[in-house]
Image (cartoon, grey):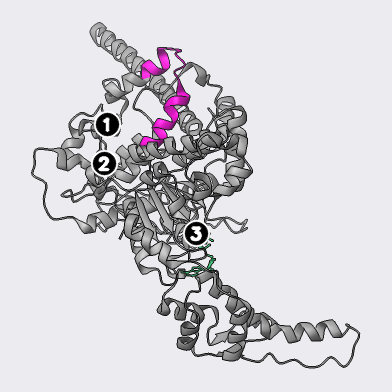
Amino acid sequence: MASSNHLSLRALRAASQAKELAEKRAEIRRKSLVILVHHYLDQEGYGDAAKSLVLESRLNTEQFSVCEKVDLTGILQEYETTYVEKFQRYPRLAKRVVVPRPTPKPHRCALHTPEEVDDQSVIGGGKKSPFFRRRSLPRSTRSGGSMGRASSDPSLSDDVNAIEGRSAHSHSRSTARNRVIDNKKREELNRGPLVGSRRGVGRSPGEEKKDPSKSSSDTDSDRGGNPSLGPVKSNRMPKQVLDLKQMISDYTRLEENIGDIGKGQPRALPAPKAEGQPDDEDESSGLWEDKSVKPPLALPHLTGEFRDLANIIHREILIDNPEVRWEEILGLDDAKRLVKEAVVYPLKYPQLFVGRFKPWRGILLYGPPGTGKTLLAKAVATECKTTFFNISATTLVSKWRGDSEKLVRVLFELARFHAPSTIFVDEVDALMATRQGEQEHEASRRMKTQLLVELDGLTQGNHHVFLLAASNIPWQLDPAMLRRLEKRILVPLPGSEARKAMFRHHLPELITDLEEAGHAIPTNLDYGRLSELTEGYSGSDLQVACREAAMGCLRKVFNVLEDHSVEDTDLPEIKLGSIDMADVEAALQKTRPTQSDCQLYSDWHEKYGST
Ligand SMILES: Nc1ncnc2c1ncn2[C@@H]1O[C@H](COP(=O)(O)OP(=O)(O)OP(=O)(O)O)[C@@H](O)[C@H]1O
């Protein structure tokens, strides 16, 4: 009897201790989550949100820092990896909230409380997020799922140290921040094997389970610092056959991850559903249709005037989406091919552009004025969804003369932060014309040097930042600059077929722009003949001529409108006529082409151009 009493007391004490331990662990987990989320918000520049979190959680985040190599992105990647291994598809973590219609009466058969409905709609495929509902999590080798296991989990004991150790070392977060962001972006872009792996997460399950205490960035660096080389760096011979399907699917995944505008839906690897898999993940959420927006000033270490300059860049130089598609650029087949090769493919298929295949960072687009150099740069930014910084060198020199060196510095810093980015510098010759020795202004000299330094940084670093520079007078470029603009692409005047296409585009057989006013204007044109008449015209010249021809139609309307007042009862009925050859020929007489010496371009192209 006594002995059984004694035993039950021990059991009670053990149960109470286990409960205490479980509660302590839960508390530690809660605090760890707050610290991780705070770190993430802070890193991404959501400063206000981070401050609110500190206030609401009443956790002194100053006293804690996340342990090295632990961050939410890494944890999420690990989760994705495990999930892909189990289900051969990527987990869906969030979906668009369906705003409930105002139907106040609950249905008799409703299965969920309003709170549950709310939870469903926010995260995680119709059920609470796997993060919130442990049961729906596929069992991970690292998850430390039950409390009992948690106590022996080394990663968790690290967390305990983080919370309990009170190592109040406020480590230099600002310098680490950029590195972390860049690494993160790079990982995102580099993930995925060059050859071999079927699952597309860049590592085999064996490798993954090798050391559960290591974070994903650990295992990447173990393979020689470049995640994309994972399978190739092992002792296995690399296969000679590229897994094209894999590359395309990696790119698709990358597109989804960085927020695909327009194409929209996350595409999953097709696979039969497995046990434990949430059953409503097929729904397309449309979540990624919106590009997530980084806060405008997300570089907290920028202070004072640098912060002001960053503000100016955000306001005046950064363009969200320039909205130019490849198909809108008529002709220029060679230039388009070269630009795609130089910028688009490295972004789409980063696995192929490593080591000696590293992509060009500085690209020069040169050719006569108005031939589509800016359009090409914008198309790169649109089609690759890179952040687009558009600055004209003359503005940089004249408007920011005293500050231009600093502006260049901040511009490149922002471009790295928002990577993948394209910096387009128009009229680069104004910036980098051959240096003028002693007479050169000190500020101008410093700015040029800064630009060269930044360009060196681009070519040596692994940031996905491209400089596209444009010039109408490439022969005046400083040789030091030219050397760094490694790829030089001629953007010539349009050929005869391109001119024909441009006429067809600007003056189609039926112009419907005035449909709202109840008019459609037919044209009656010989496009071949118009093309013959316009040799030497640039795309911009042709556009102007076509507008002039179209405006001719409206002129008679203007005349009538000007000659009559609203009260007039005898307003004539005007019928807009068609646009004929004579109209366009007259317009061509009025709009002469910008003269450019094509011979100069082809000579320079022979010497320095890329083919
Ligand atoms: N190949 C083309 N296809 C379609 N439109 C074109 C083309 N080339 C020029 N255009 C028209 O001309 C306009 C000016 O083109 P863009 O600004 O790209 O020229 P650019 O070469 O950058 O000129 P600049 O050297 O003077 O800066 C465009 O907005 C477009 O309407």
SS at mark 1 in the image: loop
Quadrant assignment for the N terminus: top left
Q: In the rendering, at what x and y percent does residue 317 appear?
A: 57, 47
Q: Amino acid at mark 2?
A: Thr
Q: Earlier in the sequence, mark 1 or mark 3?
A: 1
Q: Between 238 and 452, which is closer to the camera in this rendering?
A: 452
Residue drawn 44% across the image and 21% down it: 65
Q: Earlier in the sequence, mark 2 or mark 3?
A: 2
SS at mark 3 in the image: helix
| Vertical arrangement, residue 102 with respect to residue 500, above or below | above
Q: Quadrant of residue 178?
A: top left
| Vertical arrangement, residue 263 with respect to residue 201, above or below | below
Q: Is most of the magenta stretch helix, strand or loop?
A: helix
Q: In the rendering, at what x and y percent does residue 125 appear?
A: 40, 51
Front of the two marks 2 and 3: 3
- Which stretch is magenta? 160-183
What is the crowding at mark 3: few (fewer than 14 residues within 10 Å), some, or many (at least 20)? Answer: some
Residue position marked by numbered label 3 in the rendering: 374
Residue behind label 1 places its C-beta within 8 angstroms of ligand 1: no
Residue position marked by numbered label 2 in the rendering: 82
Q: Hey, which residue is sitting farthest right in the picture?
A: 567
Q: Amino acid at mark 3?
A: Thr
Q: In the rendering, at what x and y percent does residue 557 appear?
A: 75, 85
Front of the two marks 1 and 3: 3
> Left of 162 or right of it: where is 569?
right
Tag 1 near tag 2, CB within 8 Å: yes
Q: Amino acid at mark 1?
A: Arg
> Left of 545 or right of it: where is 237?
left
Separation of residues labelled 2 and 3 (CA atoms): 44 Å
